Image: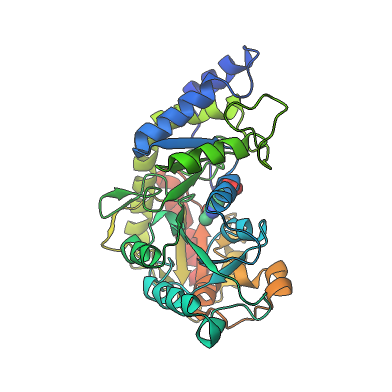
């Protein structure tokens, strides 16, 4: 038996919905897109839900709506998927990294507060937060927090910092659809939030994303930008703004609409698989399991990532698992140590030690809502054998 790294849950309802779209002439900007947005809007309780063709596109539009431009500084995390920082680079802005909480892997709110204070003060205090190679004199413009592995960041204190310095707060909730922080839905904790729907996420549209916000003006602007910069009232060949083609297709939206209807079922299945893993691995020497903070009133399991104990050779473990036909993946490679980041900003190993430690020890093992208990058994047996 071969256990895949991840797998979407697609049933007859999804197949039928996509087939029905194909029987019509409307493959973009139709009723499926509207219905999908309405489903996410209703679920989230946000005033606006704006669909786009990837989570990255959604984050980029948030960056534009927050007015982030060349030289601006944005406080964010180096322990994330690369696109949460790339969207700053798209606008020639500078992601200013702060290290994370070693338990959750999310931004450490105290470090965020200190960095915001120092960067606002400017001068020597500000300097120590900036990358070695960056343009001087940039203004702190926003905070972008990420809900890592389906666990919301500690938004109470991050929100306080954002409010204190008048900074827009962007929530990358691309891994956390359905998660809750102190009873509040992830994605709703910032001023703008983004969900993503690549096939390994909690629900999928193939490729896609949705931005949610209560901000009318930002919503209008982002709707225009995703559609080649056409503002309300513009004709097809009038472009008020510099925009993009970030539109989702009707096929993807139809898929997303059906998946949204199954969201609770899909989240519960993932919870069940995580519980199976937890029961089998909690006493397994050599690995540490995901920490769930008391403020996380609901975890939305995105991946199942363990940490190998200090001293365990992760690369060898990956190799041994592979020989047993079990895929696994180091998770995450720190963003500041990606080659293009080193080249541009001069980062070095040791700059963000907690992120690097998590990056060196994190290992995602096969996980999805369609995994069976038997498959979980096989993965855990092979993991135990590989660690022995
Ligand atoms: C998946 C993901 C995204 C968006 O990914 P896309 O592939 O562009 O949809 C952004 N941030 C994080 C943290 C993610 O995991």
List x then y, in percent, for residue 8.
Answer: 52, 38
List x then y, in percent, for residue 224.
Answer: 59, 36
List x then y, in percent, for residue 101.
Answer: 40, 72
Examine the image and state in which quarter residue 90 appears: bottom right
Q: Is residue 236 above or below residue 112?
A: above
* Residue sitting nearer the eye, 188 or 260: 188
Residue at image point 52% right, 37% down: 220
Q: Is residue 72 left or right of residue 13?
A: right
Residue at image point 56% right, 83% down: 127
The answer to whether residue 78 is visible is no
* Residue sitting nearer the eye, 144 or 121: 121
Q: Is residue 238 left or right of residue 174?
A: right
Q: Is residue 301 left or right of residue 56?
A: left
Residue at image point 53% right, 45% down: 200
Residue at image point 45% right, 48% down: 193
Q: Is residue 60 above or below residue 33?
A: below
List x then y, in percent, for residue 324.
Answer: 58, 58
Q: Is residue 137 above or below residue 306?
A: below
Question: How was this image coloured?
Answer: rainbow
């Amino acid at each position: 038996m071969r256990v895949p790294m991840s797998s979407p849950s697609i049933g007859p309802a999804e197949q039928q919905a996509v087939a029905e779209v194909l029987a019509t002439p409307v493959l973009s900007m139709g009723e499926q897109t509207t219905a999908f947005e309405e489903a996410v809007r209703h679920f989230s309780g946000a005033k606006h839900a704006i669909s786009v063709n990837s989570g990255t596109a959604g984050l980029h539009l948030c960056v534009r709506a927050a007015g982030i431009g060349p030289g601006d500084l944005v406080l964010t995390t180096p322990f994330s998927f690369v696109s949460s920082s790339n969207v700053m680079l798209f606008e020639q802005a500078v992601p200013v990294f702060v290290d994370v909480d070693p338990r959750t892997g999310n931004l450490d709110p105290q470090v965020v507060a200190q960095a915001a204070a120092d960067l606002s003060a400017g001068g020597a205090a500000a300097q120590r937060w900036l990358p070695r190679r960056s343009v001087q004199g940039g203004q702190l413009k926003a905070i972008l927090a990420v809900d890592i592995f389906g666990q919301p960041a500690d938004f109470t204190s991050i929100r306080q910092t954002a409010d204190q310095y008048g900074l827009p707060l962007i929530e990358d909730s691309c891994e956390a659809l359905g998660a809750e922080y102190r009873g509040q839905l992830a994605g709703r904790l910032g001023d703008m939030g983004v969900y993503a729907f690549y096939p390994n996420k909690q629900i999928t549209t193939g490729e896609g994303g949705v931005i949610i916000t209560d901000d009318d003006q930002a919503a209008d602007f982002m709707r225009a930008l995703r559609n080649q910069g056409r503002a309300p009232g513009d004709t097809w060949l009038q472009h008020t703004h510099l925009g993009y083609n970030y539109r989702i297709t009707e096929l993807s939206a139809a898929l997303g609409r059906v998946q949204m209807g199954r969201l609770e079922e899909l989240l519960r299945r993932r919870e069940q698989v995580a519980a199976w893993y937890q029961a089998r691995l909690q006493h397994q020497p050599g690995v540490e399991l995901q920490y769930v903070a008391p403020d996380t009133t609901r975890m939305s399991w995105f991946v199942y990532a363990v940490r190998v104990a200090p001293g365990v050779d992760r690369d060898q473990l990956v190799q041994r698992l592979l020989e047993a036909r079990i895929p696994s993946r180091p998770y995450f490679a720190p963003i500041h140590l990606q080659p293009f980041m080193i080249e541009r900003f001069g980062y070095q190993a040791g700059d963000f030690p907690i992120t690097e430690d998590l990056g060196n020890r994190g290992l995602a093992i096969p996980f999805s809502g369609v995994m069976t208990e038997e498959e979980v058994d096989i993965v855990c047996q092979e993991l135990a054998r590989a660690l022995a």
